[in-house]
Amino acid sequence: MTTAQPGAKTVKQAIQWMLRLRESGHSPALQQQCEQWRGAHHEHEQAWQRVIRMHQDLDLRAIPGAGLALQTLETSQRRLHRRQALKLLGGVAMVGTAVWLGNDRDALNAWTADYATGTGERRSFTLPDGSLMQLNTHSAVDLAFNDQQRLVRLKQGELMITCSQAGNMPRPLRVQTRDALLEAFDGRFVARQDSECTRISVSHGRVAVHRPGNELLQWIEAGQDWRVDAQGAQRLEHLNMDAMAWSEGLIVTRDMRLFDFLAQVSRYRHGYLGCSDEIADLRLSGVFRLDDPEQLLQLLPQTLPVRLRQRTRWWVRVEGLA
């Protein structure tokens, strides 16, 4: 069943609430009034979530002149879609482009990529050669497939590739990250681009790791996990999380710190998620489903001596029991 989309009038009201809250410094009284409006009808909440997603994905506050752009959106009578919003913001974004792009390339990567996923979204794609590509949350890639090469450029996030042979004269399937060029003919592997390194896990076959200049750095065999950065390649002997489990919609942990677990869960939801320092080192082992991060968090007090402190849907902090 297709869910009805909020009308232009309701979206306009949601934008007005966002503007008022921002200009008031998020006053508690106005926050309560906004929450009452959101709870008055399901269409109000739906419109609010759409505006919040657009606001977070584009990071409007980081763009010089964003207030003017939001005023333009406020008076727009068209249904609000992210691509329409981006078009409206185009002129404003040109002002101070270097500052904006320097601070937040993620939104631009997602909007200009050949394939991308949003926060909490996982998708599978069949590549032109028959290989299977799975994208994890908040990821973006470009493709360069022709007679000379099979190349996937990982712009941000995480992917899993299941390689397919390319005809009678096989050419390697390559994945380019910021830190390395990965090359495989057959098999399955995961590549994740973190802020400081690229993490690679191979479940089948083997993967060659090259420096960006094509210098062979390391062969990674099935069952191995490696970290590659500007300093070189380092094998990771004991992972506290199954690197492949996300492709099945799971987080599988092994004696994982609560702080690190929450950092992983936060990749699949919007807003703040953290914990107090005194419980950061509590350990967690288990299998958790990613489909509903909020429900997943409700399981923590059943597993550990903690409680959830939740101000809004977007602000959750895990604390120790008093």
Image: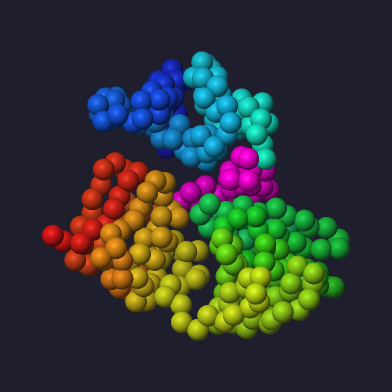
- Residue 114 in the image: x percent, y percent? 68, 48
Which quarter of the picture shows residue 160? Answer: bottom right
Magenta range is 99-122
Number of disc labels: 0
- Residue 271 in the image: x percent, y percent? 39, 46
Looking at the image, the residue that sits furthest to the left is 322
Q: Front-most of 268 and 97?
A: 97
Residue 9 vs residue 319: left or right?
A: right
60 up-or-down from 9: above or below = below
What residue sits 63% from the left and 78% below the top? 233
215 up-or-down from 113: above or below = below
44 up-or-down from 226: above or below = above
What residue sits 26% from the left and 30% below the top? 28
User: Quarter holding the N terminus?
Assistant: top left
Residue 315 vs residue 205: left or right?
A: left
Q: Is residue 117 magenta?
A: yes
Q: Is residue 110 visible?
A: no
